[in-house]
Image (spheres, helix red, strand yellow):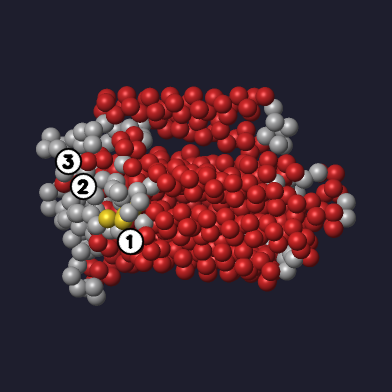
Amino acid sequence: MSSHDAVTDAATAGPAAPDAHSAPDASGSPADRRRWIALAIVMTAAFMDLVDATIVNIAIPSIERDLGATFGAIQWITAGYALAFAAGLITGGRLGDIYGRKRLFLLGTAGFTVASALCGFAANPEMLVASRLLQGAAAAMMVPQVLSIIHVTFPAHERGKVFGMFGAIIGLGAVSGPLLGALLTQWNIAGLEWRPIFLINLPVGVAGLLLGRKFITESKAPKALRLDIVGVLLVTLALLMLIYPLTRGRELDWPLWGHLCMAGSLLVFGALVAYEKYKTKKDGSPLVELALFKVKSFAAGIAVQLTFGVVLGIFFLVWTLYMQIGLGWSPLRAGLTGVPFSIAVSVAAGLSVQKLVPRFGRKVLQAGALTMAAGMLIYLWEAGRYGTSIHSWQMILPLVVMGLGMGLIVAPLTDAVLSEVPREHAGSASGLINTTGQMGNALGLGLVSVVFFGVIDEDRLGQAPAEVGTAFADAFQNALGWAVAVLAVIFVVMFALPAKPKQHIEGAEDDIAEDGTEGDGIEDVAVRKEPALTS
């Protein structure tokens, strides 16, 4: 993406590279239009990924019937995507830094499009799970480049507005997936039932490839980097050891090896940290830039991102199971029920960065956590009071309250995490942001085995629909209770975020030592102008 014909990273190879912070004075100039067209392209790709992560949920009952998928397979259809996504995101961000963000964005988009076709034509649950893993891996190459391209292209005074737009896209994509999935499944286009939820990505992906080649300008890290193969293997192994047994635990009756794997993942994470420190000293090309965690806003935001991902992972899956299997609603009715949620998220996300965060700072995010928890408590009370006779209109209040809370978190959190990150580490930082969010999401999906399926007596599933509905309603309430508890943790963690917004100065990346090294002080680098949560 470019703000004019040749915007690249300020330190990208070639002395003639123009300053990335220079923006066109004439907002209507052709160069300026190219920049905003490119923004639309990368945001469409981000939206496509976010929709795809949630669109599957609404089609789960149809997939279950058509392919004869078990509950374990259903979890893998959802969690497998998140797992492959989380395992590859850091690598995807670093590959973009090394080989070019435009190149990796286009490669990831192509892979995502092909994987979507394989999902759409899957003949059995195993093929669908494998295709979803491939789709997640391709998304891991595509998605980190979105924030990186935005970060190195737009001048600092515009990034607050752009990240506000990005936050709105995040919220809209996360909650509009179920509605789109409902329409495509309900219409049963050409008798394909659930398959169009994947096939719809094909024209979008092809258009993204063609337009991306024309409008996105290449950028790389300013100094030569190398891919950290050992780091890639360690982070992938650690995530697999943690999430795989958690996802399959209930299905396998929680074997001992699963507990040992989850405990052992902590040792592998520790080994990763030790190796990354060694790699930094050896050649300055670690997979994870550990110095980023010296930036207070980055470290605190990453912690919030992880726990917030757990909440989303739990809620969106159990919400669909509750409405469609528990209450017996059609996909369309379930999707339409979520429309107030979608609107509330988009409105709150659009207002938070531009209007609220500059004035109230961290309190906006904390208010979001409390508001979302309040909405879940209202939902929990209504589900218990009305049981299986609850109506869609009775869900409007809790969904609107929850949506407002979610919108207050998603947009300012992205801005807070990236605001002080030097541009040459944009790929690594955005990879870490998405990895922790997806890791939290995968953990939440794995915990569905415990907080939802774990409280359902399988003997009741073969009984009358009323018994099944009651069992799913009870499980839904239990899952909501757990989600509220995690939101309480998020509220506490947010105290580690800087309290007040502050106007920053430009030129962060110019404060690097004359010898070309960053030294120990990424935290000493001057930060940028956009409203950011800093102390």
Quadrant in which residue 295 is drawn: top left
**Dot 2 or dot 1, earlier in sequence:** 1
Amino acid type, mark 3: Ile
Question: Residue 328, can we see it?
Answer: no
**Image coordinates for residue 456, horizontal then vertical, percent:** 77, 45
Q: CA distance from mark 2 to mark 3?
A: 10 Å
Depth check, front residue: 197 or 296: 296
Question: Residue 525, can we see it?
Answer: yes
Amino acid type, mark 1: Pro
Q: Residue furthest right?
A: 464
SS under mark 3: loop
**Dot 2 or dot 3, earlier in sequence:** 3
**Dot 1 or dot 3, earlier in sequence:** 1
- Circle 3 is placed at which residue position? 512
Depth check, front residue: 247 or 135: 247
Q: Residue furthest bottom?
A: 28
* Residue at 85%, 54% in the rendered image: 467
- Circle 2 is placed at which residue position? 526
Badge 1: few (under 14), some or many (20 or more) residues near its Cα, within 10 Å?
many
SS under mark 1: helix
Quadrant in which residue 241 is drawn: top right
**Image coordinates for residue 53, horizontal then vertical, percent:** 55, 53
**Image coordinates for residue 211, horizontal then vertical, percent:** 36, 63
Q: CA distance from mark 1 to mark 3?
A: 28 Å
* Residue at 78%, 61% in the rendered image: 388
Marks 2/1 in contact by CB < 8 Å: the verdict is no
- Circle 1 is placed at which residue position? 358
Depth check, front residue: 254 or 349: 349
Q: Nearer the viewer, mark 2 or mark 3?
A: 2
Q: Nearer the viewer, mark 1 or mark 3?
A: 1
